[in-house]
Every structure is written in C-alpha cells, then in structure tokens.
Amino acid sequence: MVSFAAKLPKMIEYPKRLGWLVLWAVIVAGVFWVGSRYPQLVAKSEAGHTALTSMITLAPLFNIDATRPVWEQLGLATLNWLNANKIGMTFGVIFGAALLSVFQTLGKQKGRNGFLNSFFGMLMGAPLGVCVNCAAPIAKGMIAGGGRMETALATMISSPTLNMIVAVMLFSLFPLELVLFKYGFTLLVILVGVPLLVKWLQPDPAAILENTVCELPSAGTCALPDNDLSMTSESWGAAFQQAGSLFGKNLWYIFKLTVPFMFLAAFLTAAIHQWLPLESLVQQTPTAAGVVLVSAIGILLPLPMAFDVILTHSFYEAGAPLAYVLPLLFGFGVYSVYPFLILWNTVSRPVAFGLLGLTFMLAVFSGWVMLL
C-alpha cells in the first residue's frame, strides 16, 4: 500500500521549504498587522474629522511653504509621500517576495475560472490592510510565482477598499447612498472587470514570467540542480538554507522592479499636488469637463491607506459638490499611477491600461450621474 508521504512529492516538490516560507510570510504579516498597520488604521479612523494640512498625508514630515521655490516644494512633497508610505511599501516588497517564493514552491496555479479566481483574491486582499500602492509589489510577486493574474489583481484592489476598518470609516463619515455607490463600483471592478480584462486582453504568460527568478523546477523555466536534495532526503536545516536563498533572490527581484517606481510615483504625486490643486478645483461649480479632470486625479493619485477616505471627507464637509466627491470616493485607493507603472512594465501593458481605463470610466460615470 502506497503511503501518503510517498504520494506527497507529486503534490508539492519541497514541503519543508514551503513550510519555512509560509512561516516567514505569516511572521512578516503578523508583525506588520499587529505592530503597525491596524493600530495606524484605528488612529486614522479616529482622525476622520481632523483638519488636513497636506493633500498627500495626514502627518507630513515637512510643512511646505507656498513661497518656497517650485523645485523645493516638489522635493519636500516627494519626501512627504515617501515618508507616509515607507512602512507599507517595505511590507509590500518583503511580503511580495515571500509570496513569490511560496507560489514558486507550490507550482503554477491551474484555476481556470477567472471569476472564481477574482473572488478568492478579494477574500485574500480584504484583511491585508495595505494601500493599492503597497499591494502592487505583492500582486507582482503572486503573478511572477505562477499565481493567477485575476487573483493577484483582485487582492491588490480589495486590500485598500474592502478592509473592515476602512468600511467602518466610510459608513460613519458618508451618507449610505455614497458608500453603496462606491462599493457597488468596486465590486464591479473586482468581480467582473478584472476577470473579463484578463480574459479578453490575453496577456502573454512568457512576458509575465520572463524575469521570474529561476530556482525550482515548479517555476517551469529551469532544471533541478544536480546537487539539490529530494523531498525524502532534505532535512529541515537544508530546507531552511534553500528557502532562505530563494527568498533572498526573490527579495532582490521584487526590490529592483518596484522600488525605483516608488520614487517616480512620489514625484508624480508631488507634481499633481503642485500644478493641479485639487482642494481648490473641487470647490468650483461642477461641469462635465471638471468631472473628467477630477476623476483622472482621483484614479492616478497614489494616497496612503485610509487617507483617501479622510481626504474625500474633508472635501465633502467643506461643501464640495457630489459630482466631484463621488468620483474621488470611488477613484481614490482603487488604482493609482504606481500599480499602473508596475503592471505596465513588469506584467502586462494591455491589462495595466485596461484597468486604468475601466476605473477611470466608472469614476467619470459616477460624477456625470450626479450632474443629472
């Protein structure tokens, strides 16, 4: 009679390595959630009515004087954005590398139902507790490791939008109809838009995985090294070393692909803040063209986790028209220039542009509805 252990290699090539990698991913997530993310989210939920001194972060590192030279204002605003996102981005890179390693060890995922894959991604992303910018490296790691693109994209979008504390903030700060509008459009993007975009645009799997770290045969791109150990003979110590080596290579892979774009996203945020002053724009009489401009800013601006809710609420409390408030309430957090750059340069340009177009059109539609 064949034992379960004898059948195990057919399911998972290296279960001990997988055990170490999963343990490390759990520890990283636990330290981040308990030590930083959820205490910060609770603090932000209590600061929902706080007067804002910056359109980039709740607690700017530098106060920007309008009398300073433009280049200096841009530089300080860039530093403010980097400071506001440094913890979440660090977690995103490390956790993305951990997931890449886990998915490589598990092997390519074979789920073919895109709608079901998106649903699972939504469930994974809701408790993750990072902004869409910080979730972009995580999604990249999932895709590069052989995970389903629908799952990765749904995880990325649901993390900032379907989080429990963010939901409490939304329902406590905004009228019910606005919140339902936001969640209706968000679920439409995650559960319908994402699987259809992936299906119709048909990204080239070879292009997605061309830079994937080659370490395990389950990655599908290289042969097993001659001196590697089989599942039956690999000790926990050897598995620890191999898992550490794989994680280190994947960490560098995610770092070099995502971190440079963080600085670019920070600069673009500062530029938008400098030349498209959103706080004055949303106080004007709403027009169809104004809705288009506000929607574009809302979709592209990469804001920290939950700050999008606070910023939109500040506009709402100041009497901004709903034709501008609703596109921002939906657009802030669901996508931004940073995940667009990551998807465009490392995953699939059609999907990156398709997701941008879909979220932008829904934001514009929500504003135009309010003009009627």
Image: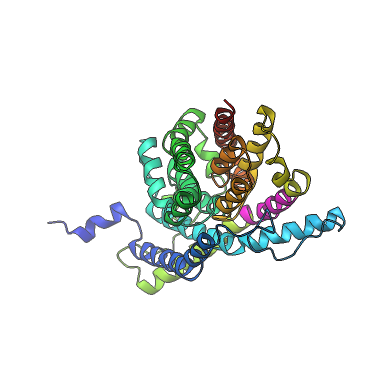
**Position of residue 85 in the picture relative to residue 234 (left or right):** right
Residue 136 to residue 20: above or below: above
Q: Is residue 185 visible?
A: yes
Residues drawn in magenta: 257-270
Q: Main secondary structure of the magenta part?
A: helix
- The quadrant in which the C terminus is found is top right
Q: Residue at x 78, y 58 (%)?
A: 75
Q: Residue furthest bottom?
A: 237
Q: Position of residue 148 (x, y in %)?
A: 43, 43
- Asked which quadrant contains residue 348, the reply is top right
Q: Residue at x 66, y 51 (%)?
A: 261
How many circles with numbers are drawn on the protein? 0
Q: Position of residue 186 (x, y in %)?
A: 47, 40
Q: Residue furthest top?
A: 372
**Figure colour scheme:** rainbow
Residue 269 shown in magenta: yes
Q: Position of residue 251 (x, y in %)?
A: 55, 61
- The quadrant in which the N terminus is found is bottom left
Between 76 and 140, the one nearer to me in the picture: 76
**Position of residue 281 in the picture relative to residue 118 (left or right):** right
Q: Is residue 142 visible?
A: no
Q: Residue at x 61, y 41 (%)?
A: 299
Between 275 and 33, the one nearer to me in the picture: 275
Residue 355 to residue 87: above or below: above
Q: Residue at x 69, y 59 (%)?
A: 53
Between 294 and 358, the one nearer to me in the picture: 294
Q: Position of residue 263 (x, y in %)?
A: 70, 55
**Position of residue 105 in the picture relative to residue 294 (left or right):** left
Residue 261 shown in magenta: yes
